[in-house]
Amino acid sequence: MPSPLVRPLDLTNDRVAGAVHRIGLAAYAVEAELIGFDGIPALGESLAELRARPLRWLGAVSAGGAEGVEGVVCGVLAWEEAAPGEPVHLDRLCVDPAWFRRGIASLLLRHALTELFAGRVVEVTTGAANAPAVALYERLGFVRGADFSPVPGLTMASFSRRPG
């Protein structure tokens, strides 16, 4: 099976937006189980709320069945555009559970770091007990900062990656 391609996603497209929403719900359900906390805000986010967020989207899309046929979105990365010189804050990195352990998150994050955010500080948070996410960020050069608890029962880990 060929590797998925990384490309921008347009959430004004109903099929794309539906796929992004479905992937987010499925991925955050897995994270909720890993961290023992089911109050992740994205789990209650409607499709309309997702589309209303001021986010830019990148997707890993599997190759289509025939030339010209669009593939399947298998993972997404979203961020808010930051002013020049300001850190980029990753909002979410989600992979369809059917595509777990195939390098999709690494593919998306590496692409973003080299092609979109080169020379920029990038920041992200994840559940501190989400071992796969923690390992991914550390493997790609993110440095763990202070953990924090936004609500009782949830500990988040913060990470930043400086250029160079």
Image: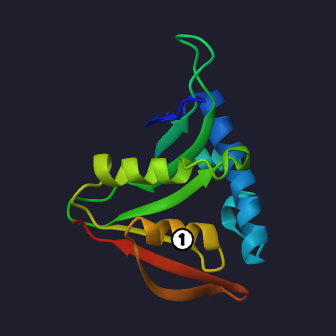
Quarter-of-image position of residue 44: bottom right
Quarter-of-image position of residue 88: bottom left
For label 1, count other residues whose C-alpha is less than 10 Å away and answer few (under 14), some (14-19) or many (20+).
few
Q: In this rendering, does residue 58 appear at all? A: yes
Residue 110 position within the rendered picture, expressed as x and y whole percent measured from the top left: 39, 52
Residue 22 position within the rendered picture, expressed as x and y whole percent measured from the top left: 72, 44
Q: In this rendering, does residue 54 appear at all? A: no
Q: Residue furthest top?
A: 67
Q: In percent of the image, x 58 and y 31: which residue is there? A: 62
Residue 80 position within the rendered picture, expressed as x and y whole percent measured from the top left: 41, 56
Q: Quadrant of the N terminus?
A: top right
- Nearest the viewer among 112 and 22 is 112
Residue 37 position within the rendered picture, expressed as x and y whole percent measured from the top left: 76, 76
- Colouring style: rainbow
Residue with the mark numbered 1: 135
113 to the left or right of 71: left
Q: In percent of the image, x 70 and y 55: which residue is there? A: 27
8 to the left or right of 75: left
- Nearest the viewer among 23 and 143 is 143
Residue type beneath disc 1: Ala
Q: In percent of the image, x 63 and y 42: which residue is there? A: 20
Q: In percent of the image, x 65 and y 28: which residue is there? A: 15
Q: Quadrant of the C terminus?
A: bottom left
163 to the left or right of 29: left
